[in-house]
Amino acid sequence: MTPLSFIVDAQLGAARAGRILTAHGEVQTPVFMPVGTAGSVKSIPQDVLEELGAQIILGNTYHLYLRPGHELVHSLGGLHKFMSWERALLTDSGGFQVFSLSDLRKVSEEGVNFRSHLDGSSHFFTPERSIEIQIALGGDIIMAFDECTEHPADEARTRESMDLTLRWAKRCKDYFDAHKSEVPWQSSGEQALFGIIQGGMYADLRRESAERTVEMGFTGYAIGGLSVGESREKTQEMIAHTLEFLPKGGPRYVMGVGYPEEIAQYAAMGVEMMDCVLPTRAARHG
């Protein structure tokens, strides 16, 4: 089986209705993906989540690595079995969570030193380590390890961060290609690796990041580093510009957006996948 197939069934303007075929079933697009941070979508019982028709949910590499640990999840048959979810799963790389620990992390060429928000213990994530953890978790779609650029950031700082993300993307792909067949409960090649586009709020950097990431040949592509404090208009501008340089033959994912009007707007622009903690977080806080 190929790691992931994408079929476009219909198109109206830029909007596309399609299907992502994974080892754990079909995902109809455009799709909003609920976030199950530590192996559970907070505040929603799993049977209700299934009744609501969620076809793919997210797991969080950073949180699952810290607790209960990816080795334990792996030993129990992977994240699908650990959380008793038979449909598709996507795991993020941990990059955004490490980014959010601004006072507890130190970024270098090799990776990121950070302290756990749970107990202050010291940890080190490299691109290779992130992919190793995600292979062990066994998600259908896994993400390259990136640096999410802070906002605001000047162009020089944004370029430095984008270039680092591109070098890390290459390391992620090399490690993935060498180790993707190491999950015993999966047939070889059932996981798909997505690259992440950065470039902050600079259109020329977004284009360069997209073109150079696409050259590496990932299965799908995500637009990262948005909804970090910029205006909604700027978010829309960066998405529209970046989409021009992403392949039409694969799914396109905008990370971290979840207001209802955003979901409709970005789907109309040609985005296939979106995720956010917003719906469950807003609900459980009333």
Image (cartoon, helix red, strand yellow):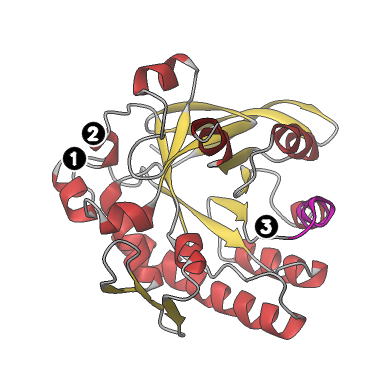
| Label 3 vs label 2, nearer the camera | 3
Distance in Å between CA atoms under marks 1 and 3: 34 Å
| Residue 132, horizontal then vertical, whole percent | 30, 61
Q: Which amino acid type is shown beneath numbered disc 2?
A: Lys
The structure residue drawn at horizontal position 76% and vertical position 33%, both measured from the top left corner, is: 261
In-front residue for pair 19/65: 65
Check disc 3 and report the residue beneath it. Answer: 226
In-front residue for pair 250/57: 57
User: In this rendering, is residue 267 above or below 169?
Assistant: above
Residue bounds of the magenta highlight: 230-239
Check disc 2 and report the residue beneath it. Answer: 81
**Label 1 crowding class (10 Å Cα cut-off): few <14, some 14-19, many 20+?**
some
* The quarter of the displayed image where residue 18 is located: top right
Check disc 1 and report the residue beneath it. Answer: 77
**Label 2 crowding class (10 Å Cα cut-off): few <14, some 14-19, many 20+?**
some
**Labels 2 & 1 near each other (Cβ < 8 A):** yes
Q: Main secondary structure of the magenta part?
A: helix
Q: Is 82 left or right of 149, judged from the image as shown?
A: left
Distance in Å between CA atoms under marks 2 and 1: 6 Å
User: In this rendering, is residue 155 above or below 2?
Assistant: below
Q: Is residue 224 visible?
A: yes
Q: Is residue 180 visible?
A: no
Q: Which amino acid type is shown beneath numbered disc 1?
A: Gly
- Residue 237 on the magenta segment: yes
Q: Secondary structure at mark 3?
A: loop
Distance in Å between CA atoms under marks 3 and 2: 32 Å
Mark earlier in primary sequence (3, 2): 2
User: In this rendering, is residue 78 above or below 67?
Assistant: above
